[in-house]
Image: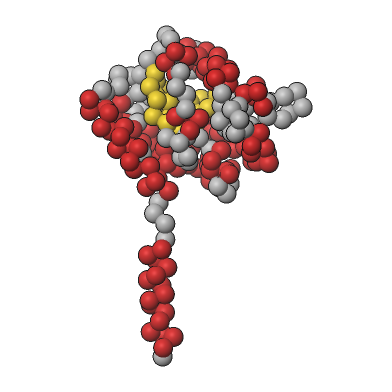
Amino acid sequence: MAAALLLPFLLLRTDAADPPAHEARFEKEIQAFEASDKTNPPPQNAILFIGSSSVKLWTTLERDFPNHKVFNRGFGGSHLSDSAAFVDRIVLPYRPGFVLIYAGDNDIAAGKSPQEVFADFKRFVQKVQAALPDTKVGFISIKPCPAREKYLEMVKETNAMVKEYAAANDRVLFIDVFTPMLTAEGRPRPELFVKDGLHPNQQCYQLWASIIIPVLEQPPR
């Protein structure tokens, strides 16, 4: 009898202890973007960079893309699922002509499978295209990190799925920064990272810009 009375209480405690959705961690950052947009709105039909800390820390974005209107909505530690969750708030209101997203390595390091990451990317694309059918989405491939080299095969698998998906979708592009970031032996190039072996340094960002700019300037497919 006592055990039967205790069971609902235990179930209640378990439910109460469940963590909030992953994206809830970033609510304050998203609110800060929204507050900034009210006083300093980004230009319409510009190029939006969104994703995890590799985007957030790209502080030279405007200098690296001098001939393009670009703006940054990266939020550190985020997953692809988080960018998908906030599409209505920090993508659609800007009506960007092009969205460039970098995310995925945090996801894999947190235990998500390549299939889960790919599904989150498709969800992101579908939400953007449903509201903004003329907007292009570019996936900046997941980078090979010295600090996360053990996940290299999973990164390759995820990138391959996105590349195949992009080839079949006129408004989706796969941007390969992964291959140029490998040594001749197929290992991550450490000189492209800050000391943590995880985040890009300025040399890496310049490499990325040199790869992305021709994609932005290519004629429509």
- Total labels drawn: 0
Of residue 7 and residue 121, the one placed in the foreground of this image is 7
Of residue 197 and residue 106, the one placed in the foreground of this image is 197
The image shows residue 90 at horizontal and vertical percentages of 33, 33
Please say which color scheme the image uses.
secondary structure
- Specify the farthest residue to the front: 195
- Residue at x 37%, y 71% (from the top left corner): 12
The image shows residue 10 at horizontal and vertical percentages of 42, 75
Q: Is residue 97 visible?
A: no
- Specify the farthest residue to the left: 39
- Specify the farthest residue to the bottom: 1
Q: Quadrant of the N terminus?
A: bottom left
- Residue at x 57%, y 43% (from the top left corner): 108
The image shows residue 9 at horizontal and vertical percentages of 38, 76
- Specify the farthest residue to the right: 185
Above/below status of 59 relative to 125: above
- Residue at x 52%, y 17% (from the top left corner): 209
Q: Is residue 30 visible?
A: yes
- Residue at x 42%, y 35% (from the top left corner): 75
Residue 85 shown left or right of residue 157 in the figure: left
Residue 196 shown left or right of residue 50 in the figure: right
Of residue 87 and residue 23, the one placed in the foreground of this image is 23
Above/below status of 212 relative to 130: above
Of residue 167 and residue 100, the one placed in the foreground of this image is 100
The image shows residue 55 at horizontal and vertical percentages of 47, 28
